[in-house]
Amino acid sequence: MTDDRAAAVVLAAGKGMRMKSALPKVLHPLAGRPMIAHVAANLAPLACDPVAVVVAPGMAAVERAVAPWPSVVQAEQLGSGHAVMAARDRLAGVAGDVLVVYGDSPLVSTESMRRLLARRRAADRPAVVVLGMRLDDPGEYGRLIVGADGGLDAIVEYRDADADQRTINLCNSGAMAIDGRRLFELLDKVGNANAKGEYYLTEIVAVARRDGLACAVVEAPADELLGVNSRADLAVAEAALQQRLRARAMVEGATLVDPRTVYFAYDTRLGRDVTVGPNVVFGPGVVVGDNVEIRAFCHIEGARIEAGAVIGPFARLRPGCEIGAGARIGNFVEAKNARLAAGAKANHLAYIGDASVGERANIGAGTITCNYDGFDKARTEIGADAFIGSNSALVAPVTIGERAIVGAGSVITRDVAPDALALARAEQVEKRGGAERLRQMKAGGKTAPAKGRAGD
Ligand code: UD1
Ligand code: CA
């Protein structure tokens, strides 16, 4: 292995007790994907090799989330230092740097990881480089003890820190770059005589100093280095991430009318001159073309929206939607696995599921594609320029031909030919003078004939 390619260890075996959850902590989502997937995505550009993800027994879901990176199992959770030891076999023969990152610090950027490695390679060759952050309220983070020469002398865990040390606001984020040739020799000297009785990775700094080795700190912005131990921390990390995603959307040319109320997924892509109204939520897998307008209170996931379309207010696009150029999805319209071609419109109160709607077709208010019969899903095909009258039920599988018109209130169970007019509703009955007779009957105290009896 060459010296400039690092190995990496991702720690994810902690029990996450403070989350009070059946789900492993690192699988709790941020911006639509698990925390550990954020760590993996930020680590990936460094092309570390080998990578070992340390998990606890029974964390198959975490192993799947990080595949193809291999996992190693830490049989007992005896501390973060002990966790790195679990990767010893996997890292055998590594002579370059080892980057250690925590699965519960999901926002550490690729850039900060690069800076850690770069500092390790500086002329003074510190054996351990720690990513630090300054916090106004450092809470229970480990504190970085910096010597008079500016080098790092120790990391003191909050529980083991004295009152003076607790006033230090330079904190440990968890991420470190360590000389791979010394890593395990140093870890072997880490003990567990501390408040938690754990083998702390953080003690590696004091151990290295005792061996006469230099250690260093690289600082990064605090909002990148948030550790997630509780649901409250998760909410803080989500807020920090959303802030970043909103800023990026605006930098890339979208108008967010009220940025604080727009929630993005990690992978939301917006084109130029997109306008997003207040209170819009994006789930994963959304791609939005140029000049699209997304009005207030929409919920959109798994959808491609092409240029110039107008969505909402109050629309819901579920996975598998493709909304063509200039198409319109109006208020209280839900679509799922549906393709609306260019210029198609569903402006009010409709459900369009498992359907394809041709160019310029118009879906009237209250139209429902009845895609599910309680057993199977079936598709509805609506041709170009078709017109579906209000409150129609299209019972799938069914095809409405091009330019066909379906009368309002129809229940369509058979295919409609192109250019045909389909009416599938009860014939209207009109009784001349019937209203007047009814009024007289009511005024005379008589009861109207009972309806619906046998023989009526
Ligand atoms: C840790 C640091 C602390 C730092 C903080 C930053 C230690 C001892 N302390 O504290 O200095 O300020 O992170 O967020 O590391 N893990 C295992 N196996 C174990 C124990 C932990 O894999 O046996 C993993 C966890 O999954 C987690 C990481 O190690 O990813 C840190 O463990 P955690 O218990 O969360 O440490 P903190 O108390 O947050
Ligand atoms: Ca933690």
Image: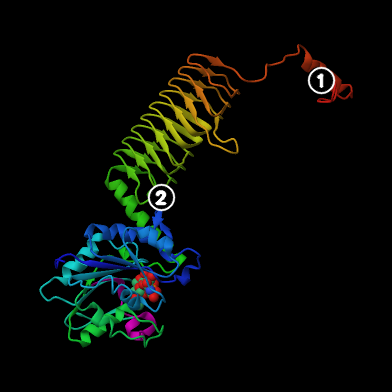
Horizontal side of residue 290 vs 46, given as left or right: right
Image position of 248 with respect to 127: above or below: above
- Image coords of residue 442 (percent x, y): 85, 23
Name the quadrant of the C terminus.
top right
Name the foreground residue: 407 vs 101. Answer: 101
Q: Mark 2 belongs to which amino acid?
A: Tyr
Q: Which residue is label 1 attached to?
A: 439
Q: How is the image coloured?
A: rainbow
Q: Which residues are magenta?
A: 157-177
Q: Nearer the viewer, mark 1 or mark 2?
A: 2
Residue 401 image position (x, y, % from top left): 48, 19
Q: Looking at the picture, does residue 222 appear above or below residue 68? A: below
Residue 154 location, x and y as percent? 26, 82
Q: Is residue 265 visible?
A: yes
Q: Amino acid at mark 1?
A: Arg
Is 176 included in the stretch rendered in magenta?
Answer: yes
Q: Are marks 1 and 2 in contact (CB under 8 Å)?
A: no
Q: Residues within 10 Å of mark 1 (few under 14, many from 20)?
A: few
Q: Is residue 410 magenta?
A: no
**Image disc number at residue 263:** 2
